[in-house]
Image (spheres, grey):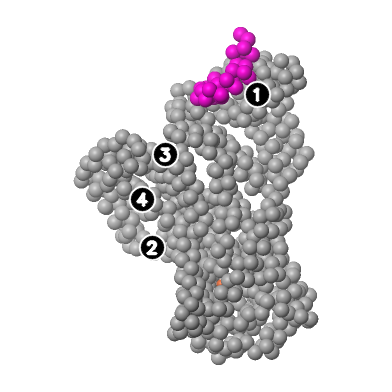
Amino acid sequence: MDLNNTFSAAGFNEKMHQGLDRSYYTDLYSKFSEFHQNEYNIFFHLLTTPLGLLGLMSLIRVITNSSTIGMAMASFYVLTLVAVEQLPLSVFFGTTALVFVIMMSSRALKLNMISSFVCIALGYGLQDLAHIITGEKTYDSTYALSGELDVSSLSTWATFFLDHCYYLLPLCVDLVIPETFIRIDPPAGMQNLYTHAYALIPLFMWTLGSYCLDSKNGFCFFPGVHYSGRVVQCQLCTDDKESRKKDLKTVRDWAIAHCPSKQTSSHWWFSDLQGSVRQAFENCAKSSIISKMMREQFSERHYCVDIVEGMNEIYVSGPAREEECFNSDQIFYSKHVDGPLGFVPFVSTYRCIVGMDKNLAISTHFPMKPLSQNATEGEVIGFDFNREIHYITKDPSKEAESDEFRVVLKLHYCMYPRVLRPLGWMMHGASVLYNKTFRALFLKTIKPHSYYEHFLSWNVIFTTSLFNYLETFVGERNMVYFILAASVSYITGNNMMFLYMTSFIHYFRYISTYYYRSETDYGSFKRDVLLFKTIALTQLGLVYLFPEFMATYVYKCDFMPFTFDAVSVLMIASGYVISILATHALGLDRTYFGSELGFCSYERTNQFPYGFIPHPMIVSQVWALLGIAKAPHVNHLLPYVIPTHIALYMTHMLQEQFDIYQKPKISDEKKLL
Ligand SMILES: [Fe+2]
């Protein structure tokens, strides 16, 4: 058979131009499988193809100095596969799993450039060797007229070669998936993702960059992944030569000598300082202790750390003035996020509060971490200027024991991936501009007199509260994820996509957080799992109660009318009542792994349903989910959703039952001691 005639580049292009690429993958697979009949050859391909890709991923990692770029490319590759028509779902998921294993191996093995090239060469060479040993011709030979590289018709050869490379992984996976396996086509409209890639790629990168913000969250690519807390601490007054005690005293004495106000807060920019005080301030900003602290969160290898001089200042706290009308000083005493630039992906601006005196009265709180700290002499607390909720409180009973003024340095640093320097420079400039503008507004509203100043002051407080509520209950990064999910739904014209992308997140977060445990951002963990669980159950509830409306106007598919099923209702009610009782018995924090993560002590309870039902929290909710699935109209509309909910819940239950989590390393345990 002349394969060049039956499957030529011209034929391929013709199909593409006619838009008849629906069977392109299946055509390709049937040709590819003709050359891969021998089971040893297939086995070798399953080893050599991932080996070559491991080399490629490692090479990208070496060149970019980061796993993130490779991870983004691999994720995008998987995303493009959903657009391949007639690619069976089993092959899609198999390929995704293999890509994931390759990515994780690349991170774990940390191959250098030579080893990466060796892997690529071995992957390619051993594949040809497998063909020679098994006596099967290579698929390459069908589009190269002479040898491996056809220089006589380079562009045609390159088209086929790239095509071959692109599909190689799914083709190999397809070879081992039995023909009898259910070959479910992807949901309708998935192909549109490919044609709207110009919009989806930036959106996807935006979402990725909203989670993947530092080295500790380097693999945090969606809300289902364990998220590490981002508040950092260190001490500048030490016993060695790195100590900045003298410098802090110089700056503090200078601030006190300038008679700070007792009625309002006071500020001096770094640029206003001269001589020895300027040098002392600079010594603190460039301290190796702070640099080391930052480098633990933002590795030297992947991130640039710049001092943001334009934002640095000396600050003296003012009183709360709660009894007065709206004024800017109230912001510090109410929960707030300092800056509005948290939506900028991959980059962070950190504010470091450096304590300079004996301060027992004023505490800074980070409810998401959670952490409360006084920032006494030399103590440094660093946090994301645009993302971390915080506020201060004053304990008047301790004012007598404290210094009269609470003077702090506010130092700022901008961190950005080395491969995204321009974005980092933009963030640096934008942060300075915002801070200067906000300071002007702040000073105008610190003691408002006119109606206009009162209005501005009210606006400052209102906007601050709005950001606080958004971050407390939703989270800016989750907002970005919702925008991505809604866009995918819109582009595919399939609202089920939103349901799939938002319904199971909390299980992945339970499993990953229970597994990793260390340095968990506990507030955002509780917020995110509650948020995604609420969204998942709301969608199920709407389908349960209004199947006709949801099928007609939201999911645009056929439906079964609502049928009242008493058993179903009883199962749902009893399941959720037991779940609420279980939460009540344990308390909210222990329900959300508070004792496992070290945020509260372990307490054994025998209060019902504990002691009566094993794993009552999960069992009761699985029972309720079965109750929802029992309703025929739900089962008709969402046949796979509830089994997936139950499978993921059961996976987590097994994880709890067998206590599967990452045990701390001996060195970490010693550190804790
Ligand atoms: Fe603040």
Q: Earlier in the sequence, mark 3 or mark 2?
A: 3
Confirm or deny contact between disc 4 and disc 3 (CB under 8 A).
no
Q: Circle 2 — which element? A: helix
Residue 631 in the figure: left or right of residue 213: left
Q: Circle 3 — which element? A: loop
Q: Nearer the viewer, mark 4 or mark 3?
A: 3
Q: CA distance from mark 1 to mark 2?
A: 61 Å
Q: Earlier in the sequence, mark 1 or mark 2?
A: 1
Q: List the residue tagged with mark 4.
A: 537
Amino acid type at mark 3? Asn
Q: Nearer the viewer, mark 2 or mark 4?
A: 4
The x, y position of residue 667, in whole percent, is: 66, 59
Q: Residue at x 69, y 67 (%)?
A: 308
Q: Which residues, given as a range, are shown in magenta? A: 1-29
Q: CA distance from mark 3 to mark 2?
A: 40 Å
Q: List the residue tagged with mark 1.
A: 160
Confirm or deny contact between disc 1 and disc 3 (CB under 8 A).
no
Q: Earlier in the sequence, mark 1 or mark 3?
A: 1
Q: List the residue tagged with mark 2.
A: 586
